[in-house]
């Protein structure tokens, strides 16, 4: 008996409910992306370095190493508010007086994580120049107390003192036994040497210095020295706490001076890391605060993105050769800045590739162009839905319920942040090496989860399936979610176009969910998970670059709690989560449009939730009487 052939499985017709995405339009729009890419290619330029100074760099690496060991050995615990911190203030004031300076102390109070409000002191010394415009050399003096802080940051403090000695006029022989030196010629700009407090716990001292001591418009450049005594390649940190970077000419000059001293290229963050820092502005070093305010600033360090491990930060690990290289590079950089006829003011955004840069506006243009195929396909899908007269109002109402739930979660999170449930903020990002910085606030998160669950009990009453859902209703739910994603993308593009880096994967992956919603479950799951690539990129960057591992999840949440993310972007993220929830419900077969009046229970979601809770309590206490009361 001959086998009966199976009927051929036909592919759904283009434009049908099962195949609603116009792939041709989507692919054709991608051709427009080539224009911004071409513009970006032609915008690549090579920033000029400032001319080399006529005077040779003056820096004694052996003396700087001795100063760093002295500070770390005498005051190993320099946490703000401790006796060691007070002693370190007097130590640096004494060293500056020996070199003929009249140090100034600025005393203030600030909140420090796990320590509350404590007293801090900034110490500054100035060399007047022919111009009141200032070049600032900055180094924080405190440490976390988990180790002697030899590299972080006794090394930077020692280098600051040694650099100041080149501009000093000591009245007597210094404590190191070296002969008094003659003051160099008067600099063209005022040179300020600032030893800040609270740098190991954020930017408390640097923020005070910027707000109170100098007019930002008078700052030519700020050079931050932080952990320069390691044995790694000296590097340059350039990202700010806003989507800005230090001037490319300043970075290029610093890299050239390091290369001249070391004989090899300076280390700079990779292009992807720079892009992530522009999309989610974050940097642990104090220069980031100045860059965010439009002041040219960089940090020179051997530690990379994360400060060294405090438990391993001992004086015997300091490397004299590296300290000498960074110190002489800084001295040459100061001289170049001082003798330059004109120094570029302000900050900008760009990607630094060794000797070349791509301007930020070109990168933003490419991101916005990559957004166009999704927008065109979504608008086309919406038009098709309207032509078919598929009702969208129930789908909008369903999305509204999800959005209200996530707004509830965001509101509770904000309340806990403002009331200090998640810890004390210092006003700047707390480095992960600070004890307890990445610890999960178990009680606070438990309260957040409990209140979020309460909000979900109220919202889910309108989101539970009550009847079979037609394919047209599922398509409407997907279209509404995609429209919400389009609005989210436009808001992100208006606030910070670089942040589209985290949004674009979800747009171009989830656009195809209506097309595959009847495919095998693993296909739907793969497309859905692909949309979370941007979130994984952000959290993974923190996990790897800052050595946080799984704790990166809460560390990013803590940055949000401390106000490092704008309200607009936070609201956009909540709207994104609501759209993701609706698309996940459609893909998982759990989506239902907002129920009609005839499909809703007599009681609203709040009253029904309260009733269920009360009946549950009574059933537990009096099972027999509750059954009789609940019987029809």
Image (tube, helix red, strand yellow):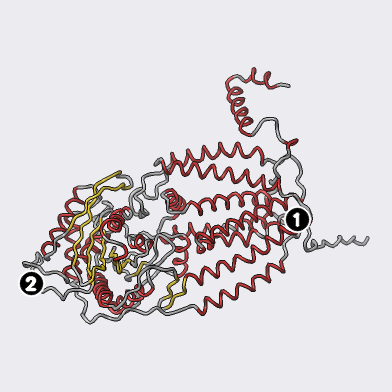
Name the residue: 56% across, 36% down: 454
In the picture as drawn, the residue positioned furthest to the right comes out as 1
Identify the image quadrant of the N terminus: bottom right
Q: Residue 128 carries which label?
A: none
**Image quarter hosting the C terminus:** top right
> Is 376 left, or right, of 468 in this rendering?
left
Nearer to me, 146 or 177:
177
Q: In this view, does 55 lie to the left or right of 581?
A: left
Residue 316's place in the image compared with 334, above or below, is: above
Q: Which of 401 and 627 is in front in this view?
A: 401
Residue farthest along the left direction in this orientation: 172
Residue occupied by mark 1:
386
- Left or right of 212? Residue 554 is right
* Closer to the camera in the image, 405 or 211: 211
In percent of width and height, residue 333 lies at 27, 74
- Point 65% across, 33% down: residue: 604
Kindly check if marks 1 and 2 are in contact, taking CB atoms under 8 A apart as contact. Answer: no
The answer to which quarter of the image holds residue 150 is: bottom left
Residue 55: name its quadrant: bottom left
Q: Element under label 2? A: loop
Is label 1 in a helix, a strand or a loop?
helix
Question: Residue 477 at x, y = what percent?
Answer: 69, 50
Camera-nearest label, 1 or 2: 1
Q: Mark 2 points at which residue?
A: 179
* Residue 169 picture location, percent across and down: 11, 69
Residue 174: x percent and y percent?
9, 66
- Mark toward the start of the polypeptide (1 vs 2): 2
């Amino acid at each position: 008996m001959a086998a009966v052939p199976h009927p051929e499985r036909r592919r759904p017709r283009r434009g049908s409910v099962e195949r609603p995405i116009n792939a041709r339009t989507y692919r054709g729009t991608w051709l427009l992306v080539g224009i911004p890419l071409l513009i970006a290619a032609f915008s690549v330029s090579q920033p000029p370095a400032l001319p080399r100074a006529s005077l040779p760099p003056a820096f004694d690496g052996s003396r700087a190493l001795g100063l760093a060991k002295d500070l770390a050995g005498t005051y190993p615990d320099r946490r703000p508010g401790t006796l060691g911190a007070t002693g370190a203030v007097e130590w640096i004031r004494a060293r500056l007086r020996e070199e003929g300076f009249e140090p100034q102390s600025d005393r203030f109070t600030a909140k420090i994580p796990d320590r509350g409000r404590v007293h801090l002191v900034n110490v500054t010394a100035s060399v007047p120049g022919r111009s009141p415009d200032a070049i600032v050399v900055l180094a924080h003096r405190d440490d976390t107390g988990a180790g002697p802080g030899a590299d972080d940051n006794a090394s930077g403090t020692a280098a600051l003192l040694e650099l100041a000695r080149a501009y000093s006029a000591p009245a007597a022989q210094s404590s190191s036994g070296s002969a008094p030196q003659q003051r160099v010629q008067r600099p063209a700009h005022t040179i300020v040497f600032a030893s800040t407090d609270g740098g190991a716990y954020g930017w408390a001292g640097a923020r005070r210095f910027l707000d109170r001591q100098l007019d930002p418009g008078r700052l030519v450049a700020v050079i931050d020295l932080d952990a320069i005594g390691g044995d790694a390649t000296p590097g340059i940190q350039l990202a700010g706490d806003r989507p800005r970077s230090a001037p490319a000419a300043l970075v290029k000059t610093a890299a050239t001076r390091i290369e001249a001293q070391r004989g090899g290229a300076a280390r700079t963050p990779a292009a992807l890391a720079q892009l992530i820092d522009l999309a989610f502005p974050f940097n642990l070093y104090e220069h980031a605060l100045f860059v965010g305010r439009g002041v040219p600033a960089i940090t020179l360090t051997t530690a990379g993105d994360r400060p060294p491990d405090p438990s391993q930060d001992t004086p015997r690990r300091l490397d004299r050769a590296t300290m000498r290289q960074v110190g002489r590079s800084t001295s040459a950089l100061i001289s170049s800045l001082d003798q330059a006829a004109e120094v570029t003011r302000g900050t900008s955004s760009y990607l630094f590739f060794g000797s070349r840069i791509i301007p930020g506006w070109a990168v933003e243009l490419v991101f916005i162009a990559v957004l166009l195929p999704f927008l065109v396909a979504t608008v086309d899908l919406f038009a098709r839905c309207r032509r078919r007269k598929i009702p969208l109002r129930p789908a909008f109402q369903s999305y509204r319920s999800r959005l209200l739930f996530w707004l509830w979660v965001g509101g509770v999170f904000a309340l806990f942040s403002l009331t200090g449930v998640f810890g004390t903020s210092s006003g700047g990002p707390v480095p992960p090496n600070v004890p307890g910085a990445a610890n999960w606030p178990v009680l606070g998160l438990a309260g957040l989860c409990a209140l979020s669950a309460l909000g979900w009990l109220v919202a889910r009453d309108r989101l539970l399936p009550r009847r079979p859902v037609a394919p047209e209703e599922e398509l409407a739910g997907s279209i509404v979610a995609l429209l919400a994603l389009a609005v989210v993308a436009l808001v992100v593009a208006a606030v910070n176009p670089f942040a589209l880096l985290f949004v674009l994967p979800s747009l171009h992956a989830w656009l195809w969910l209506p097309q595959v919603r009847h495919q095998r479950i693993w296909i739907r799951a793969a497309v859905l998970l692909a949309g979370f690539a941007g979130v994984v990129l952000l959290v993974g960057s923190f996990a790897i670059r800052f050595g946080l591992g799984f704790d990166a999840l809460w560390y990013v949440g803590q940055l949000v709690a401390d106000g490092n993310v704008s309200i607009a972007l936070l609201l956009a993220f909540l709207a994104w989560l609501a759209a993701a929830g609706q698309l996940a419900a459609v893909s998982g077969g759990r989506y239902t449009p907002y129920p009609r009046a005839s499909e809703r229970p007599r009681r609203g979601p709040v009253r029904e939730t309260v009733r269920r809770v009360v009946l549950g309590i009574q059933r537990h206490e009096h099972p027999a009487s509750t059954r009789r009361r609940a019987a029809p």
